[in-house]
Structures are given as structure tokens and as C-alpha cells.
């Protein structure tokens, strides 16, 4: 929050989501591909199964090009993006988990080297050496997932970390294992979906059907594991988080709907996988494409729900999505948000920003854009200054409840998915005035049009 | 004025180890990364020139060699870029994040540029394997890699000079108009060209070529040596330019460091001169392979020493800007041990994998994968 602020027209959250979803689809394929290819190449070597071996070889180039190029760069991309959108949160996570990230990097290093060597040594080395390479790749890729899940889970369910500050309490958090289970299943499903295209390039019809059936089986297994993982994951979430998107009256209806849609997509993906397993001759490019989109949709839907239910936190129970720490609520109410967010008054391009708008930039702009995703002008269109001030006052009152909740008390904030407003009375009035003024140009436009 | 620039507060979370450990890991991993950066940048540039050579029989194999090397080098360079970036964030996160936020469009655009450059290198590699022309993808990838280097240099310079943040926020071009920007960029580029030239020569003559290949190997090695020699000569000029472009306070700060800072700096320059001498001595690269090997070693030495100087210079920049800080420390030795064991284990497995890949060649009739 005390960093320079960069507003994105599409919204910082959406920007992270786009980069992250593109990355996770590819990286999960890279992990699942490693596991599936290691098993399939082993089977091909043991049985002397030429079509299976050719399937593995055809899949290897796409694995290399996707995982070591797109996967590696988009992985760094997530990091770059969260560093720009949430620098304070990134810093906090780095301070807590740098050794975990470094460990993941060590496995990624092995993953890249073995991927390059494996693809480069087709028809050059003995099957034994080639199998060693893909097994090492699968081992490294899977362990990189096992490590990174600890950090991802921590952001939503930090477990006992807030009270103990112990690395292992944070890393082995309540959603760690369910997350690993879900992701492992999706990895297998995505690998099967990607490899289906390579199977379709098999010229022998009988062999093509056999390969499609095998991949259909892998996909079915993966989706079953993913569904089980999701089920356990939801039950591992704390009750206040569950209330946001589960039950008869979820607080975030859009997220509950997103969850329902994701289950439907998972069902479609499972039906397609079962169809191909039972009737492999029906496998075709459109079916394979639909299965790939569906499997990617399952993962994207999960990530959307996982990110969504973290509201209003970026790191649960510690730091709100706008970078305000629970521990600094009182101090900022006294000194003012702009005493810390000094860069909020300086906009890219050199414009000096008035107080109300600066408070918006400091407290709201990490989630709300002006006119795009969660656009503030749309939200504020029904507000006048008094209404906005009343709403902000209620949000400020929530600050004490968030503090009590973080201290372990069973207290429910009035707005459980919004960070509290923090700042002085003058800042509150200034933001309320600015919000109300956002309605004015539109009203004037409508009047002119009439 | 640097003192008036509002710096983000230090992260209240303690860092999970003593600062010296992060400095050491940062330097070591960054050194590996920079070797890769040099290979990638130099290969892209020399590969482009080689593919444009009128003598196709001479140029294309060189371009192909560089494209083949690059696809491996890029993957490893990106991978080894991750670790120093981690350790940098632990030590100077508030400076680094601020610079990346200010230059966000360029910083995030870097990812697309890098990805495009990488895929273009693969395109060039497959085209050259198929016996096709690849000058355009190679040239484009070289330009894009230069852009990546330029963005990295701009972010680095901005991060250590908080006094320039406000101007750069008002206009990003202010970050690129830093006096040290161009010489620093050229310093990197010339190092890359030098390394690529020496590597090309070394690969051509590292084993005594067969009689029928002797002329080709000698021509290739001579071409590489000439380019490396020219680049090293230019490097001396650019090095001087870079030294005088560093702000006076920073340069004085470096000099006041005594032997700790002046020894690596002076020895690095001496290694550069030594490199020049050994490269100039090579008349017949096949007969004088020891000079080429010395040149390669001296390049490595000069690069390492200059990396130490670069690291020290960063600290002086930060001290001059009064942006240094002593963060609280709460070491996580157990987790560090897990990292260390994982890293050593993974590195050992990489060696096993690469050695087996290079040596396991089934004889005639033997099964291959």
C-alpha cells in the first residue's frame, strides 16, 4: 500500500487471473504429462508396443514447448504480475516462504534439464536411459507441485501460522493435502486431454482406438481424483469461508453460481472421458477439443472459486486485498491511510491526485477498476455523498470485528467479503465525496442526451 | 532529492536467514544466470550475422549451431534467473517492487517479448534443421532479447535510485534516459558477443578436426576469435564510458570501499586486458588451442569479478540513496536444509541425466528409445 500504485484498465485482479489461469493449465499439463508419459513409456517398452511409444514421442515435443517455454515464462509472469498488483503481499510471502520457493525452483531446474534431455535423446539412447529421464522429469514436476501447493493453500487457510509464525504450520495448512489431491487429478485429466490430439494422429485405426481408450481411462481416473479432492477441500475450509459460497444462502451468489457451473463442466469432462473409454472410435478432434476445454474449465473454475473465497484477504487473517494489515487498522484510523499510502496522490503520467481519489487508489483500486471489472462508477452510480459516507462508516466499524476475528473470537463482520475502511474522518468524507462525484458526469451525459 | 522520496516501509515479516546467506546465494545463482544471458544474447546476435553471410556453406552451420545451443541456453537461463530474483526480493524487495510497479507496462511486456523471442529461436532451429533460411526469426529474436536486456537494465537502475522514481512515474522514459543505461546495456551485449565468439571458436577446435574438416573448423574458429577480439576492444571503451556515467557519489563510494571493492574491480579490468592479449595472440586456432582455452577462462574470471563489482555497486547506490536497511531476521534453518538437500540432489540428478544422455549410445543392432 505504501508502494507506488499502478491502476490497470482491466483490473489488477483480472490481470492476475488471466496470467495465472493460462499458466496453471499449462503447468498442470506439464506435471500430469510427466506422470502419464512415464507410465505409458514404461508400458510401451515392456510390451514392445510401437503405437504407444509413438504416442509418447509425439506428445513429447508439445510437452517440451509448452512446459519449458510457455510454462516457465508464464510462471515467472504470475510472480511479476502479483509483484506489481500486490507488492506488499508478495514481499510478505517471499519473507515467509522463500526457502519453499527455492526448493520448488530446485525441482523445476531438474524438470527443465530432464525435459530437454528426454526430448533430445529419442532414438539416440537405450530405452532404459530414456525411461530414467522421463521418470526423473515426472518426479521433479510432481514435487514442484507438492511444494507450491503449500504456499497457495496458506494464502487461503493459514492454519495456526498467525499465532505461531511457524513455517510448517503455514505450509502444512488445512487445505494443503486436499489441494494436492485435486491438482493431481486435474494434472492427469489435462495430460490425457492434451495427449488425445497426439493419439488422433495415429494412422492405424485399431491402434488409435486403443490409445484413445487408454487416455480416456487416464482422464476418467484424473477427474475422479479431482472431484474427490474438491470435495475434501471444501470441507477443510473454515466455516466463515464456507458461508461465502456454500449453503442455501451463500453471501457471494456469483461465486456459488461459478462453483455450480464448474461442477457441470467437470461432469461434461467426465462424461466425455467415459465416452471415449467405452467407445474409443468416437474420439475425434471436436471431442478432444471439447474435453480439453472442459478440463481447463474445471481448473479455471476451481482457481476462480479459490481466489474468490479468499475475499477480503490476500493473505488470510493477516493482510487484506488492498495491502492493509490487520495489525495496523487502529494506527491508520488515527493517522490516516494517506500517511502510509503516500504514492496514492501521484499518478502515472504526473497528475496530482485529489484526496478522495487518492484514498480510492490506496484502498479500493487493487480490486475495483474505474469502469471495467468491478467498476466503481457502476457501483457508485446509485450513491450520493451521504449514502457513501454511511456505507464507508459501516465498513470502518467492521475494522474492530476483523481484528477480533483475527484474534480468534467468533465475530462476524457486517461485510465479510470487503476489507474494512481505514482512515480518518476527513479521508472518509473525501472518498464519499469522490464516489458521489463519479455519478455526476454520467448524470450530466444522460441530461445532455435528453 | 533522494532523501525526500517516500520509501515503502520495511516488511514487518522477518527474513528467514542471515543477509550474508542471501547475498551469497544471489551472487552464485546470478553468475550462472549471467553466463546463460551472455550465451543467449551473443548467440542470437552472431547467429543473425552468420545467417546473413553470403557464403551459405559457412554461415548456415554456424547459425544452426547457435540456434541449437540457444534453445537449451534460454531454458536454463530463465530457470537460473528465478533464484537470484527470489533472493533479491528478500533483501531489496521494497526497492525492486517499486521499480517494477513504476515500469509496469514494460516489466509485464517483457514476458511477452521473452516468449516471442524464445519461440522464434525454436522456429529458427527447426527451419535450419530443415535446410531453410532463418535470418528473419533469428534477427527478430536478437532484437527481442535486446529489448529484454534493456528493460532489465532500466528496472535495475531505477530500483537503486529512489530519487528518480517520481520522474519515472510521470514519464517512463526518464528511467531509460539514465546516464548509465546505455553503457550498462552495451556492456552486457558486448560480453554476450565476446562469449559467443570464443565459444564458437572453442567448439570448432576443442578436438583436433579430421583433415577434411580442418579448413572449415579453422575458418569458423578464426571468425569467432575476430568477433570476440573486436567486442573486447569495444568493451574497454564501453567500460570506461560506464565508469564515468555512474553518479559521482556512487563512484566515490565504490572507491572508498578500499581493497574489498577496488580489488575485484581492478582485477576484473586486468582480466579484460588479459583476455584481449590472449585473443590477439591466436593466429592459428587449431594449433593454438591453449590460448583459446585461456581466453575462455579469463572471460569467466573477468565476468565473475565484474559481477562482484556490480553487486557492490548496487549496495553503494542504495547507501547513497539512504535506502538501505537492516531487516529483522528469524532464520528457518530446517527449511533451508530441505532446500539445500533438494538443490544438491536435483543438481546431482541433472548431472546423472546429462551424462547418461551424452554417453549412452547403443551399438549397432542395440535397441534405442
Image (tube, rainbow, N blue to C red):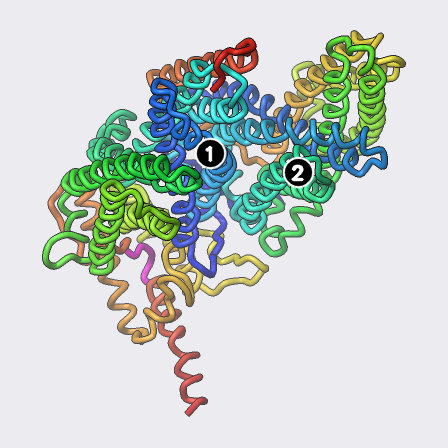
What is the number of the mark on residue B42? none
Q: Residues within 10 Å of mark 1 (few under 14, many from 20)?
A: some
Which residue is nearer to you in this view: A422 or A296?
A296
Q: Tell me where residue B302 appears, x and y as whole percent.
A: 72, 18
Q: Is residue A42 left or right of residue B23?
A: left
For mark 1, give the secondary structure: helix
x, y percentage for residue B154?
A: 64, 42
Q: Which of the numbered marks, if any, corresponds to residue B127?
A: 2
Residue at mark 2: chain: B
Q: Residue at x 22, y 42 (%)?
A: A278
Task: Report x, y in % for residue B122.
Answer: 60, 37
| Part of the protein shown in magenta | A420-425
Determine the chain carrying the residue at label 1.
Answer: A
Figure quadrant of the N terminus of chain B: top right
Q: Is residue A446 above or below residue B287?
A: below
Specify whether A179 is left or right of A100.
left
Q: Which residue is mark 1?
A: A58
Q: Foreground: A434 or B217?
A: B217
User: Does B37 appear above or below B101?
Assistant: above
Q: Position of residue B57 (x, y in %)?
A: 81, 30
Residue at left offset 40%, top offset 34%:
A30
Q: What is the CA distance from the residue labelled 1 to the residue labelled 2?
A: 19 Å
Magenta segment includes B258: no
Q: Main secondary structure of the magenta part?
A: loop
For residue A183, side relative to residue B347 (left or right): left
Amino acid at each position: 500500500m505504501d508502494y507506488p500504485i499502478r491502476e490497470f484498465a482491466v483490473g489488477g485482479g483480472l490481470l492476475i487471473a488471466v496470467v495465472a489461469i493460462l499458466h496453471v493449465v499449462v503447468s498442470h499439463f506439464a506435471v500430469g504429462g510427466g506422470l502419464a508419459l512415464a507410465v505409458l513409456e514404461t508400458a510401451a517398452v515392456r510390451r514392445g508396443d510401437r503405437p504407444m511409444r509413438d504416442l509418447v514421442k509425439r506428445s513429447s515435443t508439445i510437452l517440451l514447448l509448452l512446459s519449458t517455454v510457455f510454462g516457465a515464462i508464464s510462471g515467472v509472469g504470475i510472480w511479476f504480475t502479483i509483484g506489481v498488483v500486490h507488492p506488499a503481499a508478495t514481499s510478505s510471502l517471499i519473507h515467509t516462504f522463500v526457502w519453499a520457493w527455492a526448493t520448488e525452483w530446485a525441482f523445476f531446474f531438474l524438470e527443465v534439464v530432464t525435459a530437454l534431455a528426454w526430448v533430445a535423446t529419442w532414438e539416440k539412447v537405450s530405452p532404459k536411459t530414456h525411461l530414467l529421464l522421463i521418470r526423473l522429469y515426472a518426479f521433479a514436476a510432481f514435487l514442484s507441485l507438492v511444494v507450491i501447493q503449500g504456499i497457495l493453500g496458506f494464502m487461503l487457510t493459514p492454519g495456526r501460522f498467525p499465532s505461531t509464525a511457524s513455517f510448517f504450520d503455514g505450509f502444512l495448512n488445512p487445505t494443503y493435502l486436499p489441494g494436492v489431491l485435486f491438482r493431481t487429478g486435474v494434472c492427469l485429466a489435462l495430460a490425457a486431454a492434451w495427449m488425445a490430439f497426439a493419439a488422433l494422429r495415429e494412422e492405424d485405426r485399431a491402434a488409435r482406438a486403443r490409445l484413445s481408450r487408454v487416455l480416456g481411462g487416464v482422464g476418467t481416473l484424473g477427474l475422479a481424483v479431482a472431484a474427490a479432492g474438491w470435495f475434501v477441500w471444501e470441507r477443510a475450509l473454515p466455516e466463515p469461508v464456507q458461508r461465502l459460497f456454500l449453503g442455501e444462502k451463500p453471501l457471494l451468489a456469483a461465486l456459488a453460481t461459478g462453483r455450480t457451473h464448474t461442477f457441470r463442466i467437470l461432469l461434461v469432462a467426465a462424461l466425455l472421458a467415459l465416452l471415449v473409454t467405452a467407445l474409443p472410435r468416437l474420439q475425434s478432434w471436436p471431442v478432444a477439443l471439447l474435453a480439453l476445454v472442459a478440463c481447463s474449465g474445471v481448473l479455471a473454475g476451481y482457481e476462480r472459486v479459490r481466489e474468490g473465497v479468499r475475499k477480503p484477504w490476500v493473505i488470510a487473517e493477516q493482510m487484506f486485498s488492498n495491502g492493509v494489515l490487520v495489525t495496523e487498522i487502529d494506527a491508520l484510523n488515527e493517522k490516516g491511510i494517506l500517511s502510509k499510502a503516500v504514492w496514492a496522490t501521484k499518478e502515472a503520467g504526473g497528475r496530482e491526485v485529489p484526496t478522495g481519489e487518492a484514498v480510492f487508489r490506496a484502498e479500493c483500486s487493487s480490486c475495483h477498476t474505474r469502469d471495467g471489472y468491478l467498476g466503481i462508477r457502476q457501483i457508485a452510480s446509485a450513491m450520493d455523498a451521504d449514502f457513501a459516507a454511511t456505507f464507508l462508516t459501516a465498513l470502518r466499524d467492521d475494522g474492530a470485528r476483523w481484528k477480533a476475528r483475527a484474534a480468534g473470537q467468533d465475530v462476524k463482520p457486517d461485510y465479510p467479503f470487503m476489507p474494512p475502511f481505514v482512515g480518518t474522518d476527513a479521508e472518509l468524507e473525501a472518498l464519499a465525496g469522490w464516489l458521489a462525484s463519479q455519478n455526476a458526469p454520467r448524470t450530466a451525459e444522460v441530461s445532455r442526451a435528453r | 532529492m533522494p532523501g525526500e522520496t517516500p520509501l515503502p516501509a520495511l516488511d514487518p515479516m522477518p527474513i528467514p536467514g542471515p543477509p550474508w546467506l542471501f547475498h551469497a546465494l544471489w551472487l552464485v545463482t546470478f553468475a550462472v544466470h549471467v553466463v546463460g544471458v551472455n550465451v543467449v544474447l551473443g548467440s542470437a546476435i552472431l547467429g543473425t550475422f552468420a545467417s546473413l553471410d553470403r557464403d551459405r556453406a559457412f554461415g548456415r552451420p554456424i547459425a544452426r549451431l547457435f540456434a541449437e545451443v540457444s534453445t537449451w541456453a534460454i531454458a536454463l537461463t530463465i530457470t537460473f534467473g528465478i533464484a537470484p530474483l527470489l533472493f533479491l526480493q528478500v533483501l531489496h524487495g521494497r526497492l525492486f517492487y517499486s521499480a517494477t510497479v513504476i515500469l509496469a507496462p514494460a516489466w509485464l511486456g517483457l514476458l511477452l517479448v521473452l516468449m516471442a523471442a524464445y519461440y522464434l529461436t525454436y522456429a529458427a532451429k527447426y527451419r535450419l534443421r530443415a535446410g531453410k533460411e532463418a535470418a528473419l526469426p533469428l534477427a527478430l529474436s536478437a532484437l527481442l532479447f535486446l529489448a529484454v536486456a534493456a528493460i532489465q537494465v532500466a528496472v535495475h537502475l531505477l530500483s537503486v535510485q529512489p530519487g528518480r522514481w517520481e520522474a519515472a512515474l510521470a514519464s517512463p522514459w526518464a528511467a531509460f534516459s539514465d546516464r548509465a543505461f546505455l553503457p550498462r546495456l552495451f556492456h552486457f551485449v558486448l560480453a554476450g558477443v565476446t562469449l559467443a565468439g570464443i565459444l564458437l571458436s572453442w567448439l570448432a577446435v576443442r578436438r583436433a578436426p579430421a583433415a577434411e574438416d580442418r579448413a572449415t573448423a579453422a575458418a569458423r574458429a578464426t571468425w569467432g576469435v575476430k568477433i570476440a577480439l573486436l567486442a573486447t576492444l569495444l568493451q574497454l571503451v564501453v567500460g570506461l564510458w560506464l565508469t564515468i556515467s555512474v553518479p559521482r557519489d556512487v563512484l566515490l563510494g565504490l572507491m572508498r570501499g578500499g581493497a574489498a571493492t577496488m580489488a575485484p574491480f581492478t582485477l576484473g579490468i586486468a582480466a579484460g586486458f588479459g583476455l584481449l592479449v590472449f585473443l590477439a595472440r591466436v593466429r592459428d586456432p587449431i594449433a593454438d588451442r591453449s590460448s583459446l582455452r585461456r581466453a575462455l577462462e579469463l572471460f569467466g574470471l573477468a565476468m565473475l569479478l565484474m559481477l562482484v563489482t556490480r553487486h557492490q555497486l548496487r549496495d553503494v547506490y542504495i547507501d547513497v540513496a539512504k535506502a538501505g536497511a537492516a531487516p529483522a531476521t528469524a532464520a528457518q534453518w530446517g527449511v533451508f536444509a530441505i532446500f539445500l538437500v533438494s538443490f544438491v540432489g536435483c543438481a546431482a540428478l541433472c548431472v546423472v541425466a546429462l551424462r547418461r544422455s551424452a554417453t549412452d549410445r547403443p551399438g549397432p543392432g542395440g535397441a534405442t528409445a
